Structures are given as structure tokens and as C-alpha cells.
Image (tube, rainbow, N blue to C red):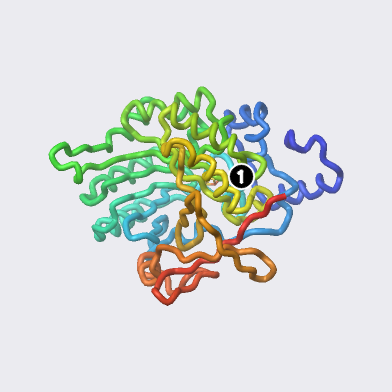
Amino acid sequence: MDRLGKNMVQGERELLRDVMKQYHSKMSPSLAKLAKESEVVMKQFAPSHLEAEPFGTTKPFEEGKNNHGIYGLERIYEDRAVITPYFECAAYCRYCFKKSRTLAGEAKRMSDSDIKRAVEFIRHDSRIKTALITGGDPFLDIELLQKVLDQVSEIDHIRNIRVGTRNILFSPEMVTDELADLLASYQQIDYQNPRNSRNISVGLSINHIDELTPAVVGAYQKLIQRGVAVRGQTVLLKGINDSVTAIRELMEAFLCTGIVPYYFLHCMPVVGAKHFRTTVQKGIDIIRELSARSGSYAPHYVYVTPAGKHRLGPDAKLTYQMLDGKRYIRAVTPYRAEDFLAFSDSNSLPELHETDENGYIVSHYLDGEED
Ligand code: SF4
């Protein structure tokens, strides 16, 4: 039972028991130690009775990671392809669908033949300039990650390789000098023709300044010192970081330790995550406050639907629509329906998406709530 459970009443304890039957929970040893010291870290990883409230999609994006019949490949944009070599994580963030019993615990991975087919797919479309290697967590199987990196880096038109991870928080000790050297070895700068260069960067998910322990900072310094850019990705979470102060402190710490603030993501409507979701407007209010400061403080604020990321500036105006008694944000996306269908190999747009008169996708995204 978690530290948060100390003051629970009987009804809440029963709900928590149900939650633990429904969802997995997992923490790495160093994360469990940190959670004992930080309430905001504990809240992100300890199961809560609040997860019992029926809510959220049971159809995780994992289902989309099977593009053109190639397991572990995903493409919805013209210029990027996603490869997921390893689908498991070393800890389950409670705001993520990974905790679901249908997904958690099984270390699903791409086979050698899946990787070969994914690489061939990318090789045959020179519009794809960026390969995003994500998970689960690709750092949990370095041998597999290296296989992917070796093959992707041989594709002539790949200019950016991005590796997404939260494992630097879960197990900072795994970032050894050897691993940092390995990642840096895929960087290739063409001084005569810079457009032919290839960059490798790491997208690191960190949600609160408490997560920047000496070990975590030391781990990503190994990468930065070798020229591997580290970009910060932060999920807006109610009760964790939903204030100007929390986000400003985190962005300041990112900048002065060499992390580039990149994405600030609204919490997705996944199962058992309702209590973590603020309104989308809350994030706009936070970045509006940050926009009075240097532009380097400003990550891209986005919410994500199955059709892609929607960026919101500090002056964004939201349009709402009520559907079945719930409040959705209706928006014309920058994505053309015909492109989405072709890139994603789909016959139809995702649920709650339609096409406008100019051929662009219109999305409806379930808003969160303030208390
Ligand atoms: S590390 Fe990422 S993929 Fe894994 S549970 Fe957390 S948010 Fe989900």
C-alpha cells in the first residue's frame, strides 16, 4: 500500500483494491527511493483509488503501431516515422495506458525481421527525414536499440534520429559512458554540405523538478557532453505540476543543465487518468505566463489525438462542442485527411474526426476538468 493511502477511508481502500486488480503497478528501485522522498513523484507512480472512476480510452495508440502490416512501425506524418523496438517500461506512470493489464508485463518487441521491414519501408520513402525510436522504452534493451540505430543510420535521407525515454529517471545508472559513446557515434556532421548531416537526440520525459536528482542530471550530462542533444518532454498533470511556478522552475532547471524545453503535453484521456487531467485552457494560461520570459523557456504546448499533435500558442482560442454531455475541443488540424489515410494505411479517419470543406481533418478532443 502506498504512502498516499495512509489517510484513506474504508470505501477508498476497497476502490484501491479494485484498481490494483485492474491495473499493474511497477517502480524501479531508484524510483521507489525517490518516491519516498517526493510526494509528487509518489503520486505519479503509486496506484490511487481515483483510478477506479470509469473513464478513458481502452484503445491505446499501441494499436496504431502496426503500419502497413509492419509490427512496431507507425506513420501518420509525411516527414516522420516511429519505430517501437520494445514495448515495456521499467515503471508505470499512472497517467499512461501502459498500466493496463492487457499491455503491461509482456515484454513485446520487434523481431529482426520486423526491424528489417520497417527500415526498408523508411528507405523507400525519401520524404521521411526523421526516425523516432520510442516505446515502451528503447533504453530497456540496448542490444535491440543498437540494431535499430545501425540500420536506420544507413538510410541516406534520414537527417534526425530521436530516441524517446523516461528510463533515465527510472534507472539513471544505465547511462554508462559506453552507452553515451554509442549514441554519440550516430551523429554525423557534414561540414561541406550541412544539409546532409545526421543528428541524434534524446527526448527525456520529466514532469517535475523533484525528478532531477543528482544521478539523473549526471546521466543526461554524459549525453550532452558528447554532443547528443537532450530535449525535455513534460506532461501537464493536475496536483503535480499544474502551476506557473512548477513549470517555470522545471524549464529553468532544464535550461541551465542543458536540456532544451520541447514538448509540454496535455494529459491524454486514457483509462484511469481522469484525476490527472486539467482543462486544456490551463496549459495555455501557463505558457502565456511563460511567454513574458525569454523564448527559450517556451516548450510547444500540445494535445494529441490519433490524427496527430495539435500545437497551442499562448493566445490560442479554443472552440468547444458538447457531445453526449461531455465537453470536447473542436479544431481544424494542419493535417490533410488524404495524407493521413495514405500515411497511416487506414481506410477511415479515427473516431470523432471528420474532414472540412478544404480537406483538412477536424478533431474533437475530450477536455479535462478543473476542481
Ligand atoms: S515511461 Fe512513458 S510509456 Fe512508460 S508508462 Fe511512463 S509515460 Fe507510459
As drawn, which residue projects farthest toward the front? 292
For the N terminus, the quadrant is: top right
Task: Tell me what residue is drawn at x 57 percent, y 35 percent.
Answer: 208
The one of 363 and 131 positioned closer to us in this rendering:
363
Question: How many numbered marks, from 0 up?
Answer: 1
Q: In this rendering, does residue 114 appear at all? A: yes
Place of residue 59 in the rendered image (x, y in percent of width and height, measured from the top left): 57, 61
Query: Which residue, as the protein is rendered here, is positioned at the far bottom?
Result: 357
Question: Which residue is at a point 81% across and 46% down the rendered structure image?
Answer: 12
Q: Residues within 10 Å of mark 1 (few under 14, many from 20)?
A: many
Locate residue 304, reporting x and y percent: 50, 56
**Quarter holding residue 92:** top right
Residue 225 position within the rendered picture, expressed as x and y whole percent measured from the top left: 34, 26
307 w.r.t. 289: above or below = below
Q: Quadrant of residue 255?
A: top left
Residue 134: image location, x then y, percent: 43, 47
Closer to the camera, 121 or 187?
187
Residue furthest left as drawn: 192
Q: For mark 1, what is the residue?
A: 237
Label 1 residue near ligand 1, CB within 8 Å: no
- Is residue 12 found left or right of 299 in the rendered image? right
